[in-house]
Amino acid sequence: MSDMDQRNSRSESAAAVETAPVRQPGKFPLKWVIAGIVAFLVIGGTAAYALFGNLSPKQQYLLYEIKTFQKAAEDFEEQNGELTEFQEKIAEQASSTNTKVSMGLETDGVVPPDFEMFMDLLNEAAVTAVTEQDPKNNTSFTEAGIEVGGESLLDMEVYQSPKMVAAKVPDIYDKYFYLNADEYGQFMRQLDPMYDGPEELSFKPLSIEDLELTEEEEKHVQDTYADFLNKELKDEFFTKKDNVSYEHNGEKINVTQLTMKMNEKETKAFINNVLDQLIKDEKLQDIIAKRAVKVANSGASQMDMLNPETVKDDIKEGLKDAKTEFKDAKIPEGVTSVLMVKDQLVIDREMKISAGSSDEADTIAIHTMDFSYDNGNKQDQEFKVEIIPGDGSEAAEILVTNKIARKDKSRTEDLKAELISKMEDAEEAVSFTMKSEFEGENPAKQKITRDFSLGTEGESTGSPVAVEGTIVQNQDVSVKDKYNNQLFEIELSGGDDMAQGTISLKIDTKTKLKEKADIPKVSTGDEVNVNNITPEQMSDIQMKAGAKLQDILLQLGVI
């Protein structure tokens, strides 16, 4: 695999990690996630089109799609490469992180004396934490504390290893309370005798490497699905037009138009063949199942809740169910996809399909646009999805636009997102806007200011809701010098239509890579197992906790 392929793979996997689903107890909801995972892998298969020479419209269509995807991954790498690489190092090397979080609350109106005292305390309070991590041994140690006016109010220590988790609040009790990983079920049954969940805790976190394809897996996907698509997508589905006029924002250019069009019979045959291929592809099912299990079993959860074979069976059953349900589907207009291509990159894409179980088929229309102009200094982007029910009921639209402008060593972005519900005589919308300014040519050392607003409009929503705020981020990352400093300053207000008040939040983190983590050894000899707390210990704990709480309230002047 080339260096560029590895970087692209890391970028794609990083996005996958950020959007990894939270696991719920019970059967893994694969039916709704298989489609997305498979689509990613199938699209990845077209990367095997290393085609040169006189390409057919079909070959150009597939090749330009993958080139556009690769360009997006390269852009992500350019903007986030240093931070992504540092996060990879964190998963491999020992590190130390210092974090300080403080809040503030201000209001323009008159408030009761008790609330004013609460505001004063909140404005002077801060939470601090120093965390040492050893990923190779899956061990960490955190010292956390609450400060008011710079003075310590309460401290806490947390230790975690593959075998146990332990916590201590020295001011309340001088011993650690610990829980062995293999005694989790016993502990939960003390709280709920009917508990029927995991018996053992697993603290292994999910990393980017857990989602990356091996070279063998990548080769299987590319070889299998490049050949499959080449065979199933017939040449007669594709047409090409050269020198088509395209205009955006007053700028006209000539582009290549590539169209893929399949009628109902062709569309149904293609989708059936895709489902048949996925059902028989044991290797692809293994690839998905292994990663689904890693996602589901990451964090403090239980490995025996899911295993690859169970997930693999669910995948196959889900695909078979989908094929059965698809038998009676109606796709009256088939599917049409139109690409506008400039310099081998897709700048405009339209796709439309109508499908349903009756003649009243629902229509889904998708439009994307990524157009650069003014010598590359300006870039407009759009993503739009329209869902139009065939029975004339409530329609929906998602519209996201972004205008990017580059000048010298800075960049600005103007993002707008809307979720619109359209009814016969009314329209409702939730809108989000964010204007961002990036100062600094090097993405690893930037100041980013984001002004955002979130609002609702429409008759049934009642009074409009408006939330406004600003996020200022100072980022300084260096893999070479082994540090990552991040400072976030956030302000949130209710906007002109709501009660006037401002909430502020400041998060300051400093992380350093190191040769060895400073983690103390916590033995269980003299500490307290939470499964074996005696009534005498519990009484002692309650008494000391009550005394400490009273002491804290005295320090704060509450009593």
Image (tube, rainbow, N blue to C red):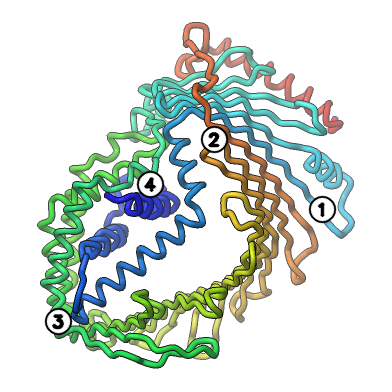
Secondary structure type for disc 1: strand
Residue at the (29%, 46%) spot, across then down: 291
Question: How much space separates mark 3 and mark 2, taking CA atoms?
Answer: 52 Å
Question: Which mark is on residue 106?
Answer: 1
- Mark 4 / mark 3, whichever is N-terminal: 4
- Closer to the camera: disc 4 or disc 1? 1
Q: Is residue 113 left or right of residue 73?
A: right
Question: Which mark is on residue 235?
Answer: 3
Residue 244 location, x and y as percent? 36, 92
Secondary structure type for disc 4: loop
Amino acid type, residue under disc 1 in the picture: Glu
Q: Residues within 10 Å of mark 4 (few under 14, many from 20)?
A: few
Q: Nearer the viewer, residue 543 or 230?
A: 230
Question: Which mark is on residue 24?
Answer: 4
Q: Is residue 162 left or right of residue 213?
A: right
Residue at the (38%, 46%) spot, across then down: 23
Residue at the (74%, 61%) spot, across then down: 493
Question: Which mark is on residue 224?
Answer: none
Residues at marks 4 and 2 touching, judged by CB atoms closer than 8 Å: no
Amino acid type, residue under disc 4 in the picture: Gln
Residue tagged 2: 482
- Mark 4 / mark 1, whichever is N-terminal: 4
Residue 275 location, x and y as percent? 15, 65
Residues at marks 1 and 2 touching, judged by CB atoms closer than 8 Å: no
Amino acid type, residue under disc 3 in the picture: Asp
Amino acid type, residue under disc 2 in the picture: Lys
Can you tell which quarter of the image residue 189 is in? Answer: top left
Q: Is residue 107 left or right of residue 473?
A: right
Q: Is residue 28 above or below residue 129?
A: below
